[in-house]
Amino acid sequence: MLETTLEILNENAYSLVAKDDRYIPDFMRIMINNRLAVDAEDWVKWLRYVNTGTYNSQWMIIDMMKFEQSKGT
C-alpha cells in the first residue's frame, strides 16, 4: 500500500462533513485496514467504512498474494 495526501483547497467542503460521533482517526483506520483486509478489493471496502471525508489521499493497493515467487536465474 502506498499513499500520498491531497490537500483540500476548498474550505467550504468541510461544512459538508456530517457531524457524527463515530469518528475514527485515519491513522487507526489504515492500521485496521492492513490487518483485516484479505485482498486489495477488501482493503478498499474497509477504507470506505466510517470515512469522514476530511483526510483525502491517493492510494495504490498492491495484492502481494497475486504475485508468483521468482524461480531465480
Image (cartoon, rainbow, N blue to C red):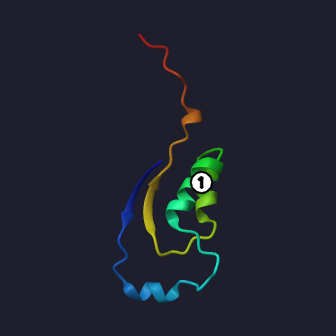
Please provide percent x and percent y for residue 17: 53, 83
Residue 41 in picture, x, y percent from top left:
62, 51
Q: Quadrant of residue 10?
A: bottom left
Q: Nearer the viewer, residue 50 or 65?
A: 50
**Number of on-image labels:** 1
Q: Which residue is mark 1?
A: 33
Classify 49 as above or below 15.
above
Residue farthest top in this picture: 73
Residue 64 lies in quadrant:
top right
How crowded pointer 1 is (Cα within 10 Å; few <14, some 14-19, many 20+) is rated as: many
Q: Is residue 23 left or right of residue 59?
A: right
Q: Residue at x 46, y 56 (%)?
A: 59
User: The residue tagged with tag 1: helix, strand or loop?
Assistant: helix
Side of 70 relative to 34 (left or right): left
Image quadrant where one finds the C terminus: top left
Residue type, numbered disc 1: Asn
Question: Does residue 14 appear to the left or right of 43 in the view shown?
Answer: left
- Residue occupying image coordinates x 58% and y 84%: 18
Query: In the image, residue 33 lies at what x, y percent?
Result: 59, 54
The residue at the point 54 percent across, 30 percent down is 67
The x, y position of residue 5, in whole percent, is 38, 63
The residue under the point 50% across, 61% down is 27
